[in-house]
């Protein structure tokens, strides 16, 4: 593996992985292939072109377009696909499930077909803990049945099943990672930690769903990048690896921690009507990837603190996004009239 096509590489996790892999491997080349939808942003890669020169290339394209995909692979002599490209926000999937099915299911199929026909060395799928559904007790293992409960989770589960089918049927060399709730630099501020952080900076209400007792594993994005790197180089072909801290915290605790870090009052917390089908708890058993020698460098609390500090220091990045018409329209549709007194 020397020439990676990082699909969705202008998004949150993809841009962090692109930067990570080019820094770590001086002989690697990375082609970022991204449609540049609302969450794809070339500002996420602003420093990469200057830092890595001809070892980095950008191609604007849709993973659902098989001709574009094949052309990019052949022009850049790609040997490995790492697929971050996806619609990922549960709230948007409830509003508009159509885009999730197209990108997360059909787009995955298109990439797998290209990898099979062009005989690539490796295909890696970046997935999510949400495919396991609500976990009332214990922790999800990679061998557990998947039970997605939102259109987003169902679309990602479908993609995972397609990846596995291509391995079993065509012997395509694949791996899958299922990550916990990633947070960190360049995460689009519709997601809860950057949303709450940036709202709190501006003394705006933090719209907390329901009672705030939903439990999540908040996992620092660069820890996830290291895990994907390890799986690519040392993981077992055809296997799935859960990636997270292995611990969780309730959303109300996460919210209070953000406010404490910013020295803001808890009166900014605004309970809102819970979203439909909201999973109460996710929990990952991460023993399989730990057996490869990986450990997260950050706890949930440390990941939140580093993320908050990044948004404090990088208003240049998020203020234009939040003031834009697209974001403002989404925010009105999502939160207007949902306040609970």
Image (cartoon, helix red, strand yellow):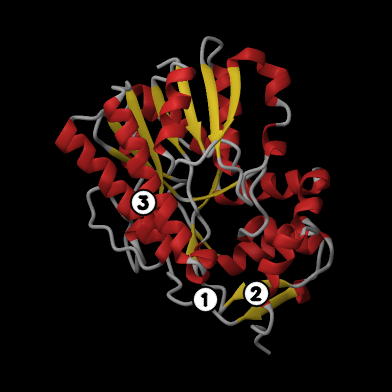
- Specify the quadrant that holds the N terminus: top left
The residue located at (37%, 36%) in the rendering is 111
In the rendered image, the vertical position of residue 182 relative to residue 95, given as above or below? above
Please identify, in this view, whether the residue under mark 1 or under mark 3 is nearer the observer. Answer: 3
Looking at the image, residue 150 sits to the left or right of residue 310; the answer is: left
Please identify, in this view, whether the residue under mark 2 or under mark 1 is nearer the observer. Answer: 2
In the rendered image, the vertical position of residue 129 relative to residue 23, given as above or below? below
Disc 3 on helix, strand or loop?
Answer: helix
Per the rendering, the mark at residue 317 is none
Disc 3 crowd, CA 10 A, few/some/many (<14, 14-19, 20+): many
Looking at the image, residue 114 sits to the left or right of residue 198; the answer is: left
Give the mark, 1 or 3, whose residue is nearer the N terminus.
3
- Specify the quadrant that holds the C terminus: bottom right
Disc 1 on helix, strand or loop?
Answer: loop
Disc 2 crowd, CA 10 A, few/some/many (<14, 14-19, 20+): few
Residue that mark 2 sits on:
333
Is label 3 in contact with label 2 (beta carbons under 8 Å)? no
Disc 2 on helix, strand or loop?
Answer: helix
The residue located at (41%, 65%) in the rendering is 151
Residue that mark 3 sits on:
105
Is label 1 in contact with label 3 (beta carbons under 8 Å)? no
Q: Is residue 274 visible?
A: yes
Q: How far apart are the alpha carbons under marks 2 and 1?
A: 13 Å
Q: How far apart are the alpha carbons under marks 1 and 3?
A: 24 Å
Where residue 147 appears, as percent x and y from the top left, is: 29, 63
In the image shown, does 259 or 226 lie closer to the viewer? 226
Residue that mark 1 sits on:
275
Is label 2 in contact with label 1 (beta carbons under 8 Å)? no
């Amino acid at each position: 593996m020397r020439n990676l096509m990082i699909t969705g590489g202008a998004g949150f996790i993809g841009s962090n992985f692109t930067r990570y892999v080019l820094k770590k491997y001086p002989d690697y080349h990375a082609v970022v292939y991204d449609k540049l939808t609302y969450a794809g942003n070339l500002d996420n890669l602003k420093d990469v072109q200057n830092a890595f020169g001809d070892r980095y290339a950008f191609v604007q394209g849709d993973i659902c377009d098989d001709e574009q995909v094949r052309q990019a692979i052949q022009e850049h002599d790609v040997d490995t696909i790492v697929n971050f490209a996806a619609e990922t926000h549960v709230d948007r999937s409830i509003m508009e499930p159509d885009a999730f099915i197209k990108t997360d299911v059909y787009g995955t199929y298109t990439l797998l077909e290209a990898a099979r026909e062009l005989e690539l060395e490796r295909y890696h799928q970046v997935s999510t803990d949400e495919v396991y559904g609500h976990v009332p007790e214990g922790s999800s293992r990679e061998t557990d049945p998947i039970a997605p409960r939102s259109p987003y989770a169902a679309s990602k589960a479908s993609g995972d099943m397609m990846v596995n089918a291509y391995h079993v049927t065509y012997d395509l060399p694949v791996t899958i990672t299922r990550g916990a709730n990633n947070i960190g630099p360049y995460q689009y501020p519709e997601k809860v930690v950057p949303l709450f952080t940036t709202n709190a900076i501006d003394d705006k209400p933090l719209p907390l769903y329901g009672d705030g007792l939903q439990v999540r594993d908040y996992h620092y994005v660069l820890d996830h990048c290291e895990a994907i790197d390890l799986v690519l180089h040392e993981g077992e072909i055809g296997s799935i690896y859960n990636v997270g801290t292995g611990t969780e915290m309730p959303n109300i605790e996460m919210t209070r921690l953000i406010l404490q870090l910013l020295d803001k009052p808890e009166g900014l917390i605004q309970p809102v009507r819970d979203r439909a089908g909201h999973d109460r708890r996710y929990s990952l058993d991460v023993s399989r990837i730990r057996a490869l020698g990986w450990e997260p460098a950050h706890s949930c609390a440390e990941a939140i603190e580093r993320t908050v500090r990044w948004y404090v220091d990088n208003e240049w990045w998020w203020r234009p996004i939040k003031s834009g018409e697209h974001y403002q329209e989404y925010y009105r549709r999502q939160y207007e009239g949902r306040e609970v007194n």
